[in-house]
Amino acid sequence: MAAKRTIAHLDMDAFYFSVELLRRPELRGEPVIIAGTSPRAVVTTASYEARMFGIGSAMPVFQARRRCPQAISVPVDMAHYREVSGRVMALVDELDVPRQRVSLDEVYLDLSGVRDPVWRMSTLVRRIAEAERLDASVGIGPSKLVAKVASDAEKPRGFVVLSREEAAKRFASEPPTLIPGIGGRTAERLERIGIRTLGELQARSVDQLRSAFGERHGPYLSARARFHCDSPVAEGEAKSRSVESTFDRDLGRIIEMEEVLAHQSTRLSEELRRRNLAGRTIAIKVKLDDFTTITRSRTVAEPTNDAATISHTARALLRAYAPPRPVRLLGVRVAAFAAPGAAVSQPVRGENLSLIAS
Ligand code: TTP
Ligand code: MG
């Protein structure tokens, strides 16, 4: 059995919004969305006041406006958020423990063997508050999974410490999608066999899940539901890179879509080359006008970062899928990177032809 681990997950509260608030204090207490300005922009984050209207990340701005017409819209300023994030991460680094930054506002720390991890983390939160005037939530547990879910459980300014068993019990009535790694599609399939909560998933035998979900996925679901997780806190480079864009108007013709994919493939290729990365899996993402989102992927023989190969594969995937409705978003991704290059991961989430690492 592996040695007992102590993992913390730190996640800044309403990060982009809180950063904006510092230079625009008049926004305090207001429903605010941070979003792009194109007609098809989506909300990157919302103030907690705006969230009370049911507004959340990734919601199209027009929909957010419908729910809360008085919401104040603030444009996204990535450069600024990146700078603030850098300073927060510098404070994290002062702890001098292994850490894995997963996005601008989210980081795992491996505090195994460190004395008084709870005190260390509360000190860190206080330092961030003093130095940057920003709040964060923390989860602490025996794994990344427990830590992540715990950090989310009492936001904002949450501080939740749980053992695996406590987590399994505490979140038993939550939907399976609470667990990172269990997405909407899996949840639908679970529901079809009568599983609506983590508790119900925990109660099923591995054998039953194996027959419903297969040799690998079945046991995985069973273990995740009971908060088993042994993935390391490792500052690897990003596992994939992608480019995607939401259009100002839906695309109906395949030829237009192919043009977009070709352009995206070129950008992605440049980005991969710059970072000395090449991957074997090429994928497309398509969002239809009814918001149905699909991804299709293909694995090629050799790791590639070649624009023509990426573009060719993306086009083939698009043709094979043959979007049944107008398309509002297209994206291309390259994953399954080969040799670990000298790449530095810089996760960016956003919209409108953004480069994304995950
Ligand atoms: P989150 O940590 O998911 O959200 P948050 O920090 O805004 O709010 P919370 O208090 O619930 O943690 O994401 C961090 C930042 O990443 C967020 O401020 C904006 C950005 N982001 C996007 O750009 N697109 C997205 O879909 C999400 C979820 C986040
Ligand atoms: Mg956050």
Image: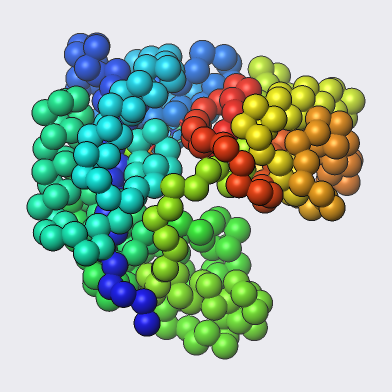
Image side of residue 97 versus residue 348, left or right: left
Residue at image coords 60%, 47%? 340
Using the image, determine if residue 209 lies above or below residue 118. Answer: below
Q: How is the image coloured?
A: rainbow
- The mark tally for this picture is 0
Quarter of the picture holding the N terminus:
bottom left
Q: Is residue 251 left or right of residue 150?
A: right
State which quarter of the image contains the C terminus: top right
**Location of residue 141 by image quarter:** bottom left
Residue 113 is situated, as x and y percent measured from the top left of the image, at: 22, 64
Image vertical order of residue 219 relative to residue 207, above or below: above
Q: Is residue 38 left or right of residue 149?
A: right
> Residue 217, image x and y in percent?
60, 72
256 over 145 or under it: above or below:
above
Q: Using the rendered image of the protein, determine whether residue 182 is visible from the camera's viewpoint.
A: yes
Horizontal placement of 271 versus 72: left or right? right
Towards the viewer: 192 or 201: 201
Q: Nearer the viewer, residue 180 or 89?
A: 89
Residue drawn 65% across the image and 27% down it? 274
Q: Quadrant of ligand 2?
A: top left
Q: Is residue 258 above or below residue 117?
A: above
Q: Is residue 294 visible?
A: no
Q: Nearer the viewer, residue 144 or 17?
A: 144
The residue drawn where x is 11% and y is 37% is 126
* Residue at 11%, 28% in the rendered image: 130
The percent position of residue 124, horizontal first and vertical second, equals 16, 41
Quarter of the rendering containing residue 218: bottom right
Question: Percent from the top left, x then y, of residue 233?
Answer: 39, 55
